[in-house]
Amino acid sequence: MKLSKNSKSLKANSLVESVIAIAIISICILVAFLVYINVIKQNKSVLSYNAKHQVEELYQQSMADQDFENEDYVYKDYRIEKQVTILEKEHIIRFDFKIKTGNKTHTIPKVAPLYLDEKN
């Protein structure tokens, strides 16, 4: 008995603390795995980003020039079709830009307010 009183007592983690630590580590691994899967799944090329940037430029240019005609733009690796719908009742202009790269088609819709000349 005398021997046990003189020995140092070691503090240990309880079972609950260990389970909580494992749960936190597991959640962190799960979040990291989901982020990694989403990044891999997107698989977007630089071409896709260039086309989206070009669509934004075409939209801004169309609004600046008040050019509301349907047009096709052909670039080296992709094609953009601009379709314009004027909805006078709602006072809006709807732009649909279709990006065609190979066999893939992606549509980017844009909406702008329609300002009518009130000189009637």
Image (cartoon, rainbow, N blue to C red):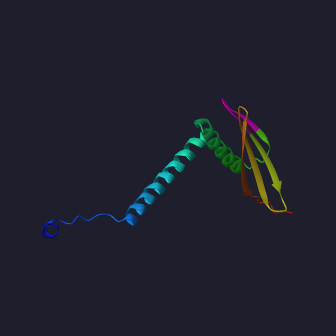
Is 77 colored magenta in this rendering? yes
User: Which residue occupies 79% across, 61% down?
Assistant: 91
The x and y percentages for residue 96 are 75, 47
Front residue of this view, candidates 116 and 52? 52
Q: Extreme top residue here?
A: 76
Is 28 colored magenta in this rendering? no
Front residue of this view, candidates 20 and 82? 20
- Position of the C terminus by quadrant: bottom right
Residue 14 lies left or right of residue 64; in this view the side is: left
Q: Extreme right residue here?
A: 120
Residue 83 lies left or right of residue 10; in this view the side is: right
Residue 50 lies left or right of residue 27; in this view the side is: right
User: Which residue occupies 26% across, 65% down?
Assistant: 11
Q: Is residue 110 above or below residue 102?
A: below
Magenta span of residues: 72-80
Q: Extreme front residue here?
A: 1
Number of marks drawn: 0
- Position of the N terminus by quadrant: bottom left
Q: Answer with the quarter of the image where residue 115 lies.
A: bottom right
The x and y percentages for residue 16 are 40, 66
